Image (cartoon, rainbow, N blue to C red):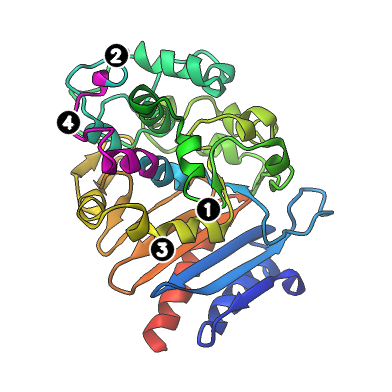
Amino acid sequence: MTQMVRGSVAPGFETVRATFEELFAGGAETGASVAAYVGGTLVVDLWGGWADAARTRPWQEDTLATVFSAGKPVAALAVLRRVADGRIDLDAPIVAYWPAFPHPAATVRHALAHQAGVPAANVSDISQILDASRFAAAIAATPPEWEPGTALGEHALTYGTILGEILRGATGETVGEVVRTFGLDVHFGLSAADQRRCAEVEHATPDWPQRQLRGHGELWARALGPAELLATGVVNGPLWRGGELPAVNCHATARGLATCYDRLPELLPAPLLAEATGPQAVGFDRLLEQDATWTLGWRRDGAWFGMGGIGGSSAGSDESLGYSLAYVTRRLGDHDRGNAMYDALEAALRTG
């Protein structure tokens, strides 16, 4: 399988390629891409494996993968772009832009920092989640879990829809339309042509969707929706690929996601970027059931800020080591593969 890894690495980053190749040789990976910038230079740009379950389509340079929550910061960035141009006020109530939101005290800042109080919506079936207007109506009809701003909890499926309704009310745009102005291979709502570039999602184990709902709290189970939402027939289907569910259905190449992080200083003015990537909500995350630090769109861990997606994709930047990295995969499993790429890149930087 290692001969199927293509792309390039800069001198000094050969061990990163070796680590990526080992993921395929050892059977941990079947189709993925990884990209990294250091100091504004693309030093890793690799892809390999297969784009389909039948192993007939090799992963190409422009193969798109669904990255789940790794796309949440991209949705946040769409809103922050309109904050930057004065069309959205961070501290305005959400109802100023979306009158149907179920709590008048919740602000745009609360929404971006996972404090809006609606991490789960009352839905009856998957079709309600995949229909943008019906899902927004479901969120509007759901009583908040807490007083906005008084607690935090990742808004697993509702995050992007709340941001999308804010954006639509303020500007008439969708998240996907604003993201297209970035000029990157990162998307919400794919055209028919782009859908043909998508990798087919597969599960690392047959019971992977069901296992995602076990071992967590009651809020987690409600927030993630039915396990069927993670079925291959759903996430490989036209409603998932062509619609906008901006909390989870971002499709991207690793290079596109890594470039988004590398170009943050171009996408946002310096003062807003500093505010947006700094801690906003710190404490016990009620959904994750662990301590977390949320910024205005990213999760922060020391010098690193970024976001992982269920199934193994991840993207982020480390301010101390000066890199941005993205790993995208079609094989839904654990985060061990992406973590291995972060570790390999950091080892190369420390020894180079």
Q: Secondary structure at mark 1?
A: loop
Disc 4 vs disc 3: Cβ atoms closer than 8 Å? no
Looking at the image, tell me whether mark 4 or mark 3 is earlier in sequence order: 4
Quarter of the view holding residue 192: top right
Q: Which residue is mark 2?
A: 99
CA–CA distance between discs 4 and 1? 33 Å
Q: Which residue is mark 4?
A: 149
Q: Percent from the top left, x then y, of residue 289?
A: 30, 40
Quarter of the view holding residue 25: bottom right
Q: Residue at x 58, y 36 (%)?
A: 209
Three-letter residue code for mark 3: Asp
Q: Secondary structure at mark 4?
A: loop
CA–CA distance between discs 2 and 1? 32 Å
Q: Percent from the top left, x then y, of residue 234?
A: 65, 30
Q: Residue at x 54, y 16 (%)?
A: 128
Asked if one can make out residue 71 in the rendered structure from this viewpoint, the answer is yes
**Up/down of 45 relative to 173, above or below:** below
Three-letter residue code for mark 1: Leu
The magenta stretch is 77-96
Asked if one can make out residue 218 in the rendered structure from this viewpoint, the answer is no
